[in-house]
Image (spheres, rainbow, N blue to C red):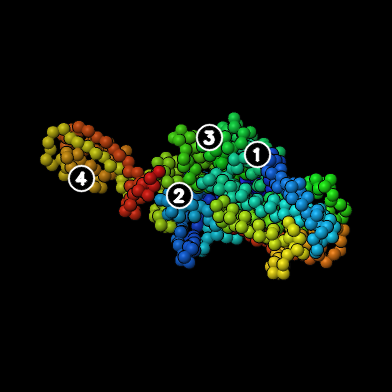
Amino acid sequence: MTTAIAPAEDAALAPDGGVAIRTRRLRRTFTTRGGGTVEAVRGVDLEVRNGEIFGFLGPNGAGKTTTLRMLATLLTPTSGEAVVAGADLLTQGGLVRRRIGYVGQTGGSDIIETGRGELVFQGRLHGMSKSQAEVRAAELLETLEIQSCADRKTQTYSGGQRRRLDIAIGLMHRPRLVFLDEPTTGLDPQARAHLWTEVRKLRDSGTTVFLTTHYLEEADALCDRVAIIDHGSIVIEGSPDALKRQVAGDAITLSLQGEHENAFAQLQALPFVREASAENGLIRLYVDRGETAMPALMRALDAANLEMATLTVARPSLDDVFLAKTGRSLRDDNPN
Amino acid sequence: MNPLRDTALVFRRYILQTLRNPVWMFFGIVQPIMYLVLFAPLLVKVASSAPGFPKGGAYNVFIPGLLVQLGLFGASGVGFGLISELRMGVIERFRVTPISRISLLLGRALRDVVIVTAQSLLLVICAIPFGLTINAGGILLALVLIALIGLMTASLSYTIALAVKSEDAFAPIVFGATLPLLLLSGVLLPLQLAPGWLRTVAAFNPLKYAVDAARAAFNSHLTDIAVVQGFAVMLGLGIVAVVLAARAFGRAVA
């Protein structure tokens, strides 16, 4: 019974200590009513490291949820292989289920049960004794700040309270890897910020978090690394900063005091400027890293006796990354 | 995981849910009681005068059929609750835990069996003042039969619910299937009164054998061939239904 609730001892079983999820050519096709086949996920290779918040991004219907459901043992892959939390997804599904926490898009708590009741029941499903489950439930109710509604039916919960309960349910057995499917969809900004804090705390306590989201700001602010999936294939994978740097670089936009005919050519020739453009008196320079380019730019302007009038530095967004890789904007597909 | 412990765990969750909101339980017994009070008295004269009406008196013929009806109606609607749980993600959540797959079905079906059996016992007790004559062995046998019908019906109800996943599709299937099954089992009036073609059709209805078995049991013919047939049919179908439902739970996708 203790195996179900003590993640530490499982670590020895993991073939590679540093990796929480590794997939190879994971594929899933569905048969449509007409008899045709739809390839929802077409050969996904992913690597999620232990102890990171990994964001899985993509437009609706791109294969995010299908991939997540496969990794959580809810869907059988059509082909390919995966190791999840140190267990083989295809042959050790039971072991995977013991080691992971799963928080689905729709939550998973029944509106006619109390929050505490659902937590205790979840613990029992994972093999805890009643008293073990009660102690752990009280602990999570406190951590996630939902004691005040613990003994009310979940029907009465606010959106934020319900989401925190869902996450608490997924954490009952202290899993070392947690899946969160669209954890903040439908939450107000305050509840979302609160949830981000909880997810970071989870990571800081050593839990690996795999989440899907279609909020680019969320992936940017919260995730250590992200993968973007489109039409069932991974388009790009890496840390949000690295991805943005790789496809676009930071954009420095400036205007100068007075007229300077060859100023643009001088700035364009600077070694750290990747690309430059000018229109309406505004000069735009694309650089690898805005924060290191700025001092160098200042010195160059001084040396050339040029004086700045205005200056802005813009970070590219993950949407720019998606745009660069697919030719489409992620936002077009997601009005919400 | 230990399937017995898991089944007990799941059973406890659902029986507590039912007991916390017992209105539905009483709702389920109201209809049979109405038949007992408002319809069964009509049979008393028919029983004594109609040629072919089985022996044993109106109540001993009618109540066994009413129990079968209770078992079928009581358990056929359980899929509605499952559909709402699918929508809330409850079943999905259970499936990503190490709990044994069959317990997800057996725990909740056991709740349904207990409720239907308790309602049946209540109905039998209510019928005694009206003139039902009872024998302990016969009642025990009949209740086991009703429990089997409950298990089979609940399992099928869950299988259909998991397949269609929406109340809109589930309701017409259940209501469309239960009424002809009941009418063709001789619950309201014995099939001995039916014309030949109707009896031929009814011979293909498994519930008819359950009704015949229950009547034989209530009339103290415990070793009658009808009892053996009824149990054989219900046990066979019960096993098939449980296997179907357990498989559906294993691969259910909300």
| Chain of the residue under the numbered disc 2 shown in the image | A
| Chain of the residue under the numbered disc 1 shown in the image | A
Identify the residue position indicated by label 4 in the image. Answer: A277
- Mark positioned earlier in the residue sequence (3 or 1): 1
Please tell me which residue lies in front, A218 or B236: B236
Horizontal side of residue A200 vs B102, given as left or right: left
| Chain of the residue under the numbered disc 4 shown in the image | A
Give the amino acid type for the residue marked by disc 1 in the picture: Gly
Q: Position of residue B135 (x, y in %)?
A: 88, 53
Q: Point out which mark residue A158 bears.
A: 3
Badge 2: few (under 14), some or many (20 or more) residues near its Cα, within 10 Å? many
| Chain of the residue under the numbered disc 3 shown in the image | A
Labels 2 & 1 near each other (Cβ < 8 A): no
Using the image, determine if residue A23 lies above or below residue A110. Answer: below
Kindly identify the residue that appears in the image at 18 percent across and 43 percent down.
A278
Identify the residue position indicated by label 2 in the image. Answer: A56
Q: Position of residue A25 (x, y in %)?
A: 47, 61
